[in-house]
Amino acid sequence: MNPRLTVSVLIAGGGPCGLMLANELGRRGASAILVDEKPGTAFNPQANATQARSMEHYRRLGLADEIRQAGLPADYPTDVAYFTRYTGYELARFRLPSSARATELVKGMSGSWSAAELPHRVSQKYVEAVLRRHAERLPGIQLHYGHRLISYVERDDGVIGEIECLDDGRRVSVRADFLVGADGPRSMVRQSLGISYGGRTGTQRDFMGGRMLAVYLRSPDFYASIPHAKAWMYNCFNGDRRAFMASVNGRDEFAFHTQLRPGEDESAITAVEAKAAFQRACGSPIECEVLSFLTWTAGHALVAEGMQRGRVFLGGDAAHLFTPTGGLGYNTAIEDAVNLGWKLASVVKGISPAALLDSYAVERRPVALRNTDYAGRFADSLGLFAPAPEIEDSTEAGGEARRAAGTYLEQHAQAEFNIPGVTFGGRYDGSPIIVSDGGLPPPDAANVYVPTACPGGRAPHAWLEDGVSLYDLFGFEWTLLQFDDVVSAKGRLSEAARALGADLKLVTLPRRLRDLYEADLALIRPDQIVAWRGSASQAGMLERVLARALGLTTSDHARLAS
């Protein structure tokens, strides 16, 4: 690093949120420096489920195919299965497609799962590696692992951060227009702002509440040692050792998590105890190599009381902390980065005033509250359901206990892993840069999603006759959808967009798709959110609507027009 650096955005934290933000900024020509204390991207698997909405954002960046090829083999089933122990009885199985099958299935799906992408089961370590490779190729983006932000000072014209190299202690200062703290649950940036978490913590459950042991392990003999079909997620359900385990590479690596039992001292756990915990869940001494292990706490549903102070922003785990049921923490972090990325770029490029950034917390914090609540409900459903004492017995009572547990767990799996409403239904109602048309969106429900173009939500998706995703027609920045010829690409709107500095793409769609948007026109933001919709007679509003969506006040717009 140079002794002194100047950049548009300083990002503290090189996990999914920070890396996605670097990609969003770099693709828009905004400069950024990212620092992270780790020597590189994640070694441990961490999060294991990429929701469909995150996959749609990766598709927008051109990364979806590369991420879908990472982790599990293309033909590996992504089933969620429940067992008394892994070599014991199978209780329930929720069948899900392989990544190869998902790319074909999605093109024929409608209703709740009308989407450009289906979910993908891939460990976070692989996602981070892909995001890092692409960020490093972008002009103006610098990634510095093995470095940490040790202090910063906010001034009227920017932020001055002090960065330290962990190898040699060398320090440099970075002058940035903005600072983003994506530096995890113990965020230095959040603490420096005096912002606390609010919400629920310390929740105790039979499972997924309290201290947990995470073990990253290699077991080449696992698949051959259990009498069951392969799954992506292996849940262990008994009164002795409850656990869940995700397949990492589909061959021999696994991410195993178990609830610590009363009397187990986390400070005394060694690789030997970690191996023993895995083998107890297996119900057999299946050989394994412990690659790493650590303890963590389940039972959080926390959201920062604020996500912005002046030129400093929070995202990812620094802004919200989840219990991992539903896989919502990492996916919420990705959407934080997407939301903040286009806005920061618009401000640093002089297109929008800094006031645009006030919409970040207005839009994202309610979604974080919503999503932590959903994750908590899933954790309650799984963790408060305790196994019957006889569930492992080879008796009639044991069989009945297994049948009852299987019925419940199958229903739970449907509720936790078939969540299009959670995935697609987050909304930005009440945002100052959304122009409401007075309509009301459908009710929010976890397992049902009703596509709607009511401004403030995800743009409804459709597959076109030639097998092209509607989203692939969107511009990278702003898109105006029209159904039949409503406005001219060469008309006043195009001139107004250029005057505002906005990159606006006009997409003309067949009239038959109008019912999907229930309007003649729809303005789509860079994050694929509907900013406004209207009739042909309202085309004259478009210039004012675009100005508002860019964060311009009436006086800002009048000044530019003159």
Image (spheres, rainbow, N blue to C red):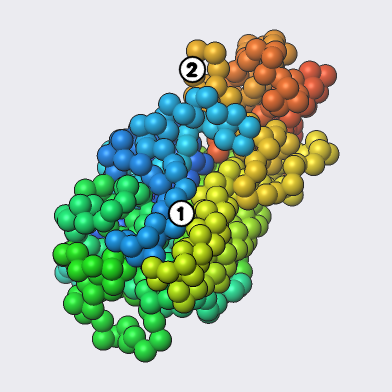
Q: How crowded is mark 1: few (under 14 residues within 10 Å), some or many (20 or more)?
A: many
Of the image marks 1 and 2, the number of the one nearer the N terminus: 1
Residue at 55 percent of width and 71 percent of height: 384
Relative to 451, say whether 411 is above or below: below
Say left or right for 540 vs 22.
right
Residue at (23% x, 67% y) in the render: 284
Residue on which the image places disc 1: 92
Residue matched to label 2? 467
Q: Which of 529 and 293 is in front in this view?
A: 293
**Image point 75% across, 41% down: which residue?**
441
Label 1 to label 2: alpha-carbon separation: 36 Å
Outermost residue toward the bottom in this view: 263
The picture places residue 476, in percent across and down from the top left corner, at 50, 30
Please determine whether, in this image, residue 372 is positioned above or below residue 107: below
Q: Is residue 67 visible?
A: no
Q: Nearer the viewer, mark 1 or mark 2?
A: 1
Above or below: residue 290 compared with residue 223: below
Image x and y of residue 357, in percent: 59, 51
The residue positioned 19% from the left and 59% from the top of the image is 218
Q: Can residue 369 be seen in this view?
A: yes
- Residue 398, given in percent of the width and then of the height, sits at 45, 68
Q: How crowded is mark 2: few (under 14 residues within 10 Å), some or many (20 or more)?
A: few
Helix, strand or loop at mark 2: loop
> Camera-side residue: 162 or 327?
327
Residue type of the residue flagged with mark 1: Ala
Q: What residue type is labelled 2?
A: Gly
Q: Position of residue 496 (x, y in %)?
A: 66, 23
Q: Are marks 1 and 2 in contact (CB under 8 Å)?
A: no
**Element under disc 1:** strand
Q: Quadrant of residue 235?
A: bottom left
Per the rendering, the mark at residue 100 is none
